[in-house]
Amino acid sequence: MGSDDFNGLAIFPRLIIGPHIRTIKLAYLKDSFSWAGLTAMLRKAVPTDLSSFILAEVNSTLSWSEAESLELLLILRDAKTLDINYMFLTSRAISLIATFPALENLKFSVTEQEMKDYTPSMVGNSFQTITHLAVRSDSDNACQLMLMKIQSRTCRSLELLRTSQDSWNVGKLFLTLQACNMALSLETLRVCSREWLGPKSFNINARALKHLHSFEQLRDLSVDPSSVDLCDNDLLEFVKSLPQLRSLVFFEDYVLNNQPNCTFIGMQHVIQFCPNLQNLTICVDARQIPIFATQPEGE
């Protein structure tokens, strides 16, 4: 649905949304978009089995009041997928979403102040069905607060997206994941940055990765862009602790005359101790070519 004018459309909601619609996706919303019009339409025509609600390609200057967000979210209470990644939520809105009984996939944006104000409910459901979580923020502190307060035991996929040029401490993020017991369930972990922000990298070193050694379910790890300070032995220690990895991506911005500490030896460690590996992205010093062992036929 590409229109940003819902005032007239709200008069005939049944002509717009049929009873069998499972996904509603709104794209290219502009400053003139009316949240009241959208809410009025959905209140009359939201399908009983609506599974997904997605806001995509939202103008960066578009905003909503807390009252508008709460009114819309109440209508979407039974959704399994809620993608409002471009709209920042207040602590009250987050508290409301935490009670959604079927929510599995959530993408949203948070600020540090709202996460400080957010207090998880001690009664009833609190993100107990979440399996996929994507958080967009300009602050790694906001992400750490969110992780500690949600304390998810069911989340299998986590994506943390930086929206500012501020430095993030991924070591503290990994430590927070360990402290909030996500090692029991997490299979996919991605830390990334908006492309237009430039090459400010996340620093990856042995101390930061040590916090992930107990993540026995982790299959996919990606940090982009990254600045890797690992030697071959560091990489060996890491991959020996996570032999189940299928994808390991440390995407570095190439800098002339900046030689990586890892060599082909480190890359061989990854391949040797992660037999299920399908995707590997890492910079190596290729000046020394090792002797590759001959493998039995078929391996």
Image (cartoon, rainbow, N blue to C red):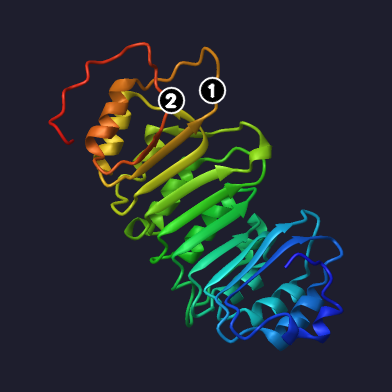
Identify the residue at horizontal 65%, vertical 73% (top origin): 92
> Looking at the image, which residue is at 70% across and 61% down?
87
First in sequence: mark 2 vs mark 1: 1
Which residue was labeled with disc 2?
283
Residue identified by numbered label 1: 254
Residue 48 on image: x %, y %: 58, 87
Residue 101 place in picture, x, y as percent = 50, 80
Asked whether the viewer can see residue 165, the reply is no
Give the CA distance from mark 2 to mark 1: 8 Å
Q: What amino acid type is highlighted by mark number 1? A: Tyr
Please indicate whether residue 214 sits to the left or right of residue 56 in the image. left
User: Does residue 265 appear left or right of residue 2 in this picture?
Assistant: left
Which quadrant does the C terminus fall into?
A: top left
Q: Is residue 246 above or below residue 128?
A: above
Q: Is residue 46 above or below residue 249?
A: below
Task: Report the front residue among 223 and 16.
Answer: 16
Q: Is residue 197 above or below residue 286?
A: below
Kind of residue at badge 2: Cys
**Viewer-nearest residue: 174 or 216:** 216
